[in-house]
Amino acid sequence: MAPRRILPADLPPDSALARRLVAHRPTARVTVDHDGSPVDAVAGEPLAVALLGAGTLTLARSVKYHRPRGAMCLRGDCDGCLVRLDGVPNVMACQTPVRAGMVVQSQNAFPTAGLDVLRVTDWFFPKHLDHHHLLVQFGGALNRTMQVFARRMAGLGTLPDAVAAFPRAELVAVDALVVGAGSSGVACANAIARGGASVLLVDEREGPGGTRRDDPTDDAAYPGCDPAVTARYGAGAVATYEDETLLLHDGRGVSVRARARVFATGCRESVGTFPQNDVPGVFTARACALALCHGVLCGERVVVVGDGPFARALVAALGARVTHAPGAAVVEALGGRAVRGATLREGARTWKVKCDALVIDGEDSAAYELAGQAGARVLWSDGRRCFVPESDADGATNYTGVYVTGSLRWGRRAPDARARDGALTGARVLRDLEGR
Ligand code: FES
């Protein structure tokens, strides 16, 4: 069994997911080439989702042991989806919208990621492989030969086919930059714009909505932006320093100078730490939900572990198609090339389940990196069990002109609560801009 596409007709007609799939019925079907085979896809959907929908679980291989890797997070956090795309190595397939005619190749594998003979490394060295010292005792020539071999089989990708062109960066100046167009980011940008300040709202996704975009039970319209807000979607903030933030948008850099920088970057999800957590077919609950919102079911036999909002949304959307273990923890994933089951534990009880998709809604952690880079003090939170930027009641940090809002500072909350927090932070930004 493998991931596959589903149709609205596969679902109860009154379900929010069926309505979403009907509302976003694909209009442009295209073909991409994956390791020499044609793959049907939908223009604009994430490439990793398209490959999953075609039944491809293994997209890459690990750097050293060539263990199979698949899309786990679909959020650019796990690097299980690195491919060579149109001659450019190390492209995250989950962050790349599909275009007609793309040529997608496995990298760091021979002959393909799905069938990689270099996997023998993992079998020969089940404990570990120290390639720095392997064969050293046999002398220089043999050791040098081994080093050449190790360099060829390890690493990530090879040089691009062509030298990339780097167009000049665009320069933009605004009163306030808001990074993240989820519920809090949109509310914050609206509050700033309605107060008369110029504001740029950016998000790496293709539109606003944040986590709501990935909730298969949510088919309500997202709150819109005020006409005075300038929004750029598909624009990832990659670095921030002094009062400038660097975006990548449409293949070029955009340097944004802003008197106030607000980070509404939300949380990251992970599957947690357990043996075999890297086997293709292990997904975060958000990844599974995101794929579902694009009409792709990540397995035929899905086990959902955990009781977070995405786990509950998946159970509500898929009903009897999934086995739900809300209070369990994963002891171990089972399987070699793909997940075949898992050992679960709850209290004193331990049991095994069979599945082809192991979906985990574990603890999330604050996506604090940009805020920290901007100068915000980042502290460990015992309650959230992660590092969180320190902020006052309105979201102002210790660093002048840097703010945080929404689930970045509070963890998972309902969209209304996140929007209220965003509006609160936006009002504070306005006051501070006027006072400076
Ligand atoms: S980074 Fe692409 S699936 Fe995780």
Image (cartoon, grey):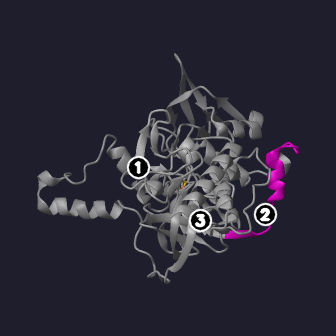
- Residue matched to label 1: 377
Percent of width and height locating residue 204: 59, 63
Does the magenta portion include 237?
no
The region drawn magenta spans: 12-31
Q: Which residue lies furthest to the front in this view?
A: 435
What type is the residue that disc 1 sits on?
Arg
Q: Which of marks 3 and 1 is in front?
A: 1
Crowd rating for badge 3 (residues with CA inside 10 Å; few <14, some 14–19, many 20+): some
The quarter holding residue 269 reads: top right
Q: Residue 26 carries which label?
A: 2
Sooner in the amino-acid sequence: mark 3 or mark 1: 3
Q: Is mark 3 within 8 Å of ligand 1?
A: no
What type is the residue that disc 3 sits on?
Thr
Sooner in the amino-acid sequence: mark 2 or mark 1: 2
**173 sits left or right of 190 in the view:** left
- Residue matched to label 3: 96
Percent of width and height locating residue 247: 52, 69
**274 sits left or right of 21 in the view:** left
